[in-house]
Image (cartoon, rainbow, N blue to C red):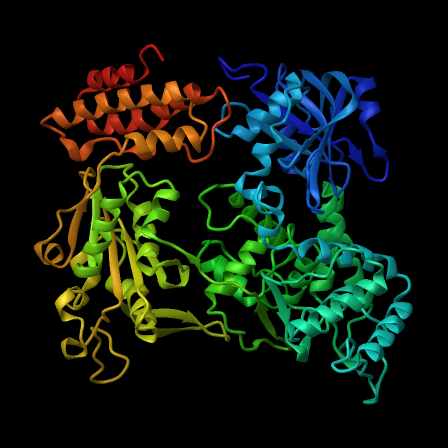
Amino acid sequence: MSEGASADSVVWFVGASFRPEGDQTDRFIDGGFWEVKNPGDWHRQQVLKMQPGERIAIKATYVRKHDLPFDNRGQSVSVMGIKAVGTITDNPMDGERVSVSWSREDPIREWYFYTYRGSIWRVVRGSGDWRADALIEFTLNDAPQDLDRFRNHPYWKERFGDEPSGKHRFQWTPFYEAVATALLGFRNDRSGLIEKLREASVRVGDPPILSDDFVFSDGTVGPLPDICPFTVMGLFNRGLSDVNRKRAAREIATILAVTEPVPQTFEGIPILNNLNSWFFPNEKNLASGQFDLLWDAFERGLEWADVGDEDVSGAFLAAYDRANECPNVGWKLTIGLYWARPWSFVPLDSNSRSYIARYLNQNIPTKGPKKRASAKGYVGLIESLESKFEESSYPVHSFPELSLEAWRLAGHEPEGPVIEEPDVEYETTQADVIAEPYAPESILEDGGFLELAEIERLLERLRTKKNVILQGPPGTGKTWLAKRLAFALMGEKDEKRLRAVQFHPNLSYEDFVRGWRPVAREDGDARLELADGVLMQAIDAAKEAPKQPHVVVIEEINRGNPAQIFGEMLTLLEAGKRTPSDALELSYRREPGERVHVPENLYVIGTMNIADRSLAMVDFALRRRFAFIDLEPKLGALWRDWVVERLGVEPGAADEIQVRMKHLNETIAADPRLGKQFCVGHSYVTPTASLETGTTRRWFEQVVETEIGPLLEEYWFDAPDEVEQARDALLAGW
């Protein structure tokens, strides 16, 4: 154990289920040890890290829909049962087992929401994550779980939060999950399922629920010989009117004895084109055992979502890869899994793939068949996104929200075909949604600490000058404010009209405006292609919608070389030269004589850190075309009310932080070597997520030691005594 670490600061949550042997809890407790079965390299490394004196708990993870201590609105809830708690007494360093002094939990105590599927989970107290601290208190000290706080966390709020049930989106999810679960009961009675679907088709008339026209190897057309669960769910997730879609869903629910109400809306659900809604081809191209492979992937997928231990995970990965190899499956496999368990699987239709790559900056895995996602890559993406969903500031917080946002940003129009030879995959997405209204007051509601009059003045300056730069010391929320000013200018939160880029020393005109770039060809060679950068893309988008404001946000505008990056566009950005008569030829033209102008409805918001000594001065050409707006640390009443009421900062501590930060900034501003441009901004002392009760002082100490302290060392790099004095003053008597 590291020097000074508490014995209770680290807790290892471990599984005790082996396959096929079953639950090993009794064996572990009676034998005074814990071990992992057939450890891989990662598991072996984790066991080697376990130290005598650290705490350990046996856990079981599962999901539940009933008998919960809160209203789950019919949604599945992740549960972790604590079966035993102990202390590690010895580690023989074999990477497989540790000795433990166990104490059985009888009855098993259940913890909700913040759980982990894997067999080894290391949780650390005091890491800044209030959920980890709460879990450790629950496990070691029987502290009750603050269910209200967890329910209203951004990751779980959509399903379980305090908003009235009618205001929650994605109310279709319990129905879809119930249909998927009920379908498993027909795995061994597929002929009976097909017959019931035929009867329903006759009953409802045109359009039929089931298109019963399978092409056999000899060219004849006849009744379907088999069916898979993905295709059954696709029967009401294809290009139908809402009336026909609900009718098909109602008939299938009747066949499956599903009692959940048929959804009234279908927001955030990818659907398939009628021409290719089956997950299997005609008989000639059918893979050997394809129907069974698809049923297996479906069943293992549900098991992975509902149980999720590592043995189940391995079975799902294998089943996914086998189904993924089959013809006529493609990316649709991820869509089908999303239908079945929408809170556990990400759909990788083309809208979602584009959104994930462009707006969430996540790579789409392509190491599977025909450059699609392998099982390992797919699950890795799911886990990466889920970890991001738990961040309050992340753009989306669930897979349904991701799917809905991807559809909205795609322009509300059904997409054309996505061709992946020899499979042809048609996808589209439906939803009923409008962009969220956004006004100057919305900036205050999001946690802005400027007065409303200041925000309105900023917007007026942006409207008239077209180009502004927000400049200020570190931590004054420049980028945060820039994006929200953009939304307030638009009047709605429309991400597709906002483009963001960060300048850096390696960024060039060719990256930002237009230039030649290498593009891989199908034969493996490369060729050069003239490609538009962020600015030209924004110009084209603004010209296509001339009545709507479009905004480019440039972070750290002085970190690159603005004159070189903008080129002739610097002239065209000027507010008085936004007409076709002022158009200029670009350095790279698509055709002889091509001239470009910047439309009136395109705005540019830059940010600039004026405390960074390594950055070059801004030249006068840039200064003449941009309005420069100073931002200062805002630690007044708006800041105090926000951190106390929204982020769990203790009122007395908030008052002390105000006083200490004011004194620090007065010291910095009065230093002739620094000045007010080096003051420390409010972002440093604004928690990114709500603090656990009683942790404010420890949190502030960590901020001073790991964030403000290193910044002061940069400021007073030649005066370490002054750094110590400033750091001590922040924490004196704390």
Q: Can see residue 228?
A: no
Q: Is residue 670 above or below residue 256?
A: above
- Quadrant of the frame with the C terminus: top left
Locate residue 549 relative to residue 521 in the image: left or right.
left
Q: Is residue 620 above or below residue 82?
A: below
For this rendering, which residue is in front, 249 or 218? 249
Furthest toward the top, the residue is 733
Locate residue 630 relative to residue 179 in the image: left or right.
left
Counting the numbered discs, the total is 0
- Quadrant of the frame with the N terminus: top right
* Quadrant hosting residue 179: bottom right
Furthest toward the bottom, the residue is 219
For this rendering, which residue is in front, 637 or 87? 637
Residue at image position (68%, 36%) is: 70
Residue at image position (23%, 48%) is: 559
For this rendering, which residue is in front, 651 or 230? 651
Q: Position of residue 288 (x, y in %)?
A: 81, 70
* Quadrant hosting residue 733: top left
Q: Position of residue 343 (x, y in %)?
A: 64, 50
Q: Position of residue 495 (x, y in %)?
A: 41, 59
Residue at image position (74%, 66%) is: 249
Q: Position of residue 241 (x, y in %)?
A: 65, 75
Q: Can see residue 475?
A: yes
